[in-house]
């Protein structure tokens, strides 16, 4: 791939992460064992992953005044924040995250300012990018249809994580997406059925391509690894074993490092290993964006 700059247009969240003995069940009141506040949001996490992987990335999105500290953390990670709007009278998006003893999570997201981006903002941000650059989006902001079509018309390559999954995703122009990243739950929702990670997830990736038309589908399967299918090449990558304490943001880390591998002209197989190694490090640490490793950390782990 010959691409120069990335525009990540996505969410910035304040993550409230609660350590719980198990996920709360309907009707239950569950005392949390601990609580921490992290920077998160799929847009913020992915732009941090791309920057820590050594890429030139700019984040566009919106926060309220209460989210200004997120900008400091983004800048410290090397992300350009000039296209993040700070809005008055609206709260920054946030997530309530339960983190169980196995490191697993479940997440409730409140959109807040993430749903207040404007078309003018999208036009302004896209004007800074040229054909061959890449747009990276998720499904936590408003007006995705407009952003996708505008980026496609401007000749940008597009990577998308359609999470959290909603009915609206089916109506998006997914055929203009070059890299579609989903986990098995989201893939199953798009296929109207479950994907069993034990049973040929490659078939599901192929079927997602056939029905929705993206260039490549990358299906992440948690402990079962990930699969890739682009119509010519297919491969499966096992997860790299690690002691998970918090899996929040592992998919965002995987995505950032997979794209970085492609930028560095790794083969698909090499990029899958690179991404898996980065995700394996991220899950051994707490929080979403604070857990994302640097390029040097990932390369050092791979050299071992
Ligand atoms: O992908 C993980 C992220 O999902 C969290 O940081 C949370 O904010 C939600 O957006």
Image (cartoon, helix red, strand yellow):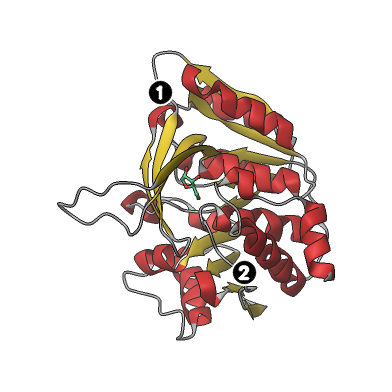
Which residue is at 66% across, 67% downward? 276
Residue 147 lies, in percent from the top left, at 53, 38
Looking at the rendered image, the quarter that the N terminus falls into is bottom right
Q: Which mark is residue 125?
A: none
Residue 186 lies, in percent from the top left, at 41, 62
> Could you tell which of marks 1 and 2 lies nearer the N-terminus?
1
Residue 195 lies, in percent from the top left, at 40, 76
Within-10-Å neighbours for mark 2: few <14, some 14–19, many 20+: some
In terms of depth relative to the viewer, which is nearer, 128 or 81?
81
- Residue 216 falls in image quadrant: bottom right
Q: Is residue 91 above or below residue 21?
A: above
Q: Is residue 246 above or below residue 6?
A: below
Taking the image as shown, residue 165 lies to the left or right of residue 287, namely: left
Helix, strand or loop at mark 2:
loop
Q: Label 1 belongs to which residue?
A: 91
Marks 2 and 1: in contact by CB < 8 Å?
no
Q: Is residue 124 visible?
A: no
Q: Is mark 2 within 8 Å of ligand 1?
A: no
Taking the image as shown, residue 16 lies to the left or right of residue 202, namely: left
In terms of depth relative to the viewer, which is nearer, 88 or 209?
88
Which residue is at 53% across, 38% downward? 38
Looking at the rendered image, the quarter that the C terminus falls into is bottom right
Q: Which mark is residue 242?
A: 2
Q: In 3D space, how far apart are the residues under numbered discs 1 and 2 (Cα atoms)?
A: 36 Å
Residue furthest out toward the top: 88
Which residue is at 51% across, 26% downward? 62
Q: Is residue 176 above or below residue 74?
A: below
Within-10-Å neighbours for mark 1: few <14, some 14–19, many 20+: many
Taking the image as shown, residue 139 lies to the left or right of residue 47, namely: left
Which residue is at 48% across, 39% downward? 36
Q: Is residue 219 visible?
A: yes
Q: How many marks?
A: 2
């Amino acid at each position: 791939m010959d691409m120069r700059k990335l525009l990540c247009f996505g969410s910035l969240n304040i993550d409230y992460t609660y350590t719980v003995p198990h996920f709360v069940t309907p009707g239950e009141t569950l005392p949390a064992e601990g609580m921490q506040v992290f920077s998160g949001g799929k847009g913020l996490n992915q732009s941090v992953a791309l920057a820590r992987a050594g890429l030139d990335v700019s984040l566009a999105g919106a926060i309220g005044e209460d989210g200004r500290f997120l900008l400091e953390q983004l800048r410290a990670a090397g992300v350009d924040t000039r296209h993040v709007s700070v809005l008055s009278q609206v709260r920054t998006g946030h997530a309530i995250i339960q983190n169980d003893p196995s490191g697993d999570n479940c997440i409730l997201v409140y959109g807040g300012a993430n749903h207040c981006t404007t078309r003018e903002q999208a036009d302004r941000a896209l004007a800074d990018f040229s054909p061959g650059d890449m747009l990276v989006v998720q499904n936590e902001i408003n007006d995705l249809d407009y952003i996708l079509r505008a980026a496609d018309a401007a000749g940008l390559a597009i990577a998308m994580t359609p999470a959290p999954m909603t009915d609206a995703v089916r109506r998006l122009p997914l055929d203009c997406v070059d890299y579609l990243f989903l986990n098995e739950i989201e893939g199953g929702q798009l296929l109207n059925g479950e994907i069993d990670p034990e049973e040929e997830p490659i078939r599901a990736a192929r079927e997602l391509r056939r029905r929705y038309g993206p260039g490549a589908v990358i299906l992440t399967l948690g402990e079962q690894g990930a699969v890739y299918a682009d119509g010519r090449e297919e491969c499966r990558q096992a997860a790299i074993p690690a002691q998970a304490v918090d899996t929040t943001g592992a998919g965002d880390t995987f995505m950032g490092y997979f794209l970085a591998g492609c930028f560095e002209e790794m083969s698909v197989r090499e990029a899958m290993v690179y991404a898996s190694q980065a995700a394996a490090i991220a899950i051994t640490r707490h929080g979403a964006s604070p857990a994302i490793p640097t390029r040097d950390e990932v390369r050092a782990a791979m050299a071992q």
